Amino acid sequence: MATPNIVNVTAIYGGTAQIPSTAITANTYTAAWVYQSPSGTDSTTNLAGLTPANNTVNKIENIVVTNTGSTAVTIDVAICPATTFNSGISTTFTYLAYGISVPPNAALVVTDKSTSFYLGNYQSIGFRSTATTVTVTASFEAIT
């Protein structure tokens, strides 16, 4: 799995992925992202950890966490090896947000366009929350 040379881009597909609250189990890392496929179909596709497809790099433009509950929720968001996002806290994680409290009925912008970054084939984005009253949304560009 090679990371493409993004100087010689073939295509750039914009996408928005989300982890719905139904996919979140409290205090467990997940990377159950879903998004509409670039083919334009109405169905959603699993995109585990926002990990890019072979010969693709994903530019993560933003990640927003929304707490729809009535009490504060603590969240973690991490870049981690694609195979370990469900394993819990690890020294192989690089945290974008760690132990941050999101107030009730509020949203937290974890990263935005001014702090965008690239994910390669062996990287993913893991998420953990102390409750199931959150949703996570990310916009990204799949560059081939």
Image (tube, grey):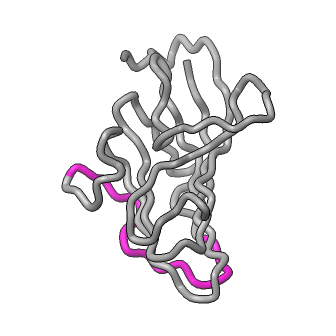
Q: Which residues are magenta?
A: 92-107
Considering every residue shown, the one lying at the far bottom of the view is 71
Of the pair 17 and 22, the residue shown nearer to us: 22
Horizontal and vertical percent for residue 20?
Answer: 62, 58
Q: Position of residue 92 (x, y in %)?
A: 22, 49
Report the residue at 60% width, 62% height from top.
22
Residue shown at the point (52%, 63%) measured from the top left: 24
Q: Is residue 46 magenta?
A: no
**Residue at the image point whose x is 63% and y is 88% from the top:** 70
Find out whether residue 106 is within the magenta segment. Answer: yes
| Residue with the most extreme left position | 91
Q: Quadrant of residue 120?
A: top left
Q: Quadrant for residue 99, please give it.
A: bottom left
Q: Is residue 125 above or below residue 10?
A: below
Give how far across and how far down residue 96 sits, in percent: 40, 58
Magenta residues, dominant SS class: strand
Residue 35 in percent (x, y) is at: 66, 40
Left or right, 3 with respect to 107, comes to left
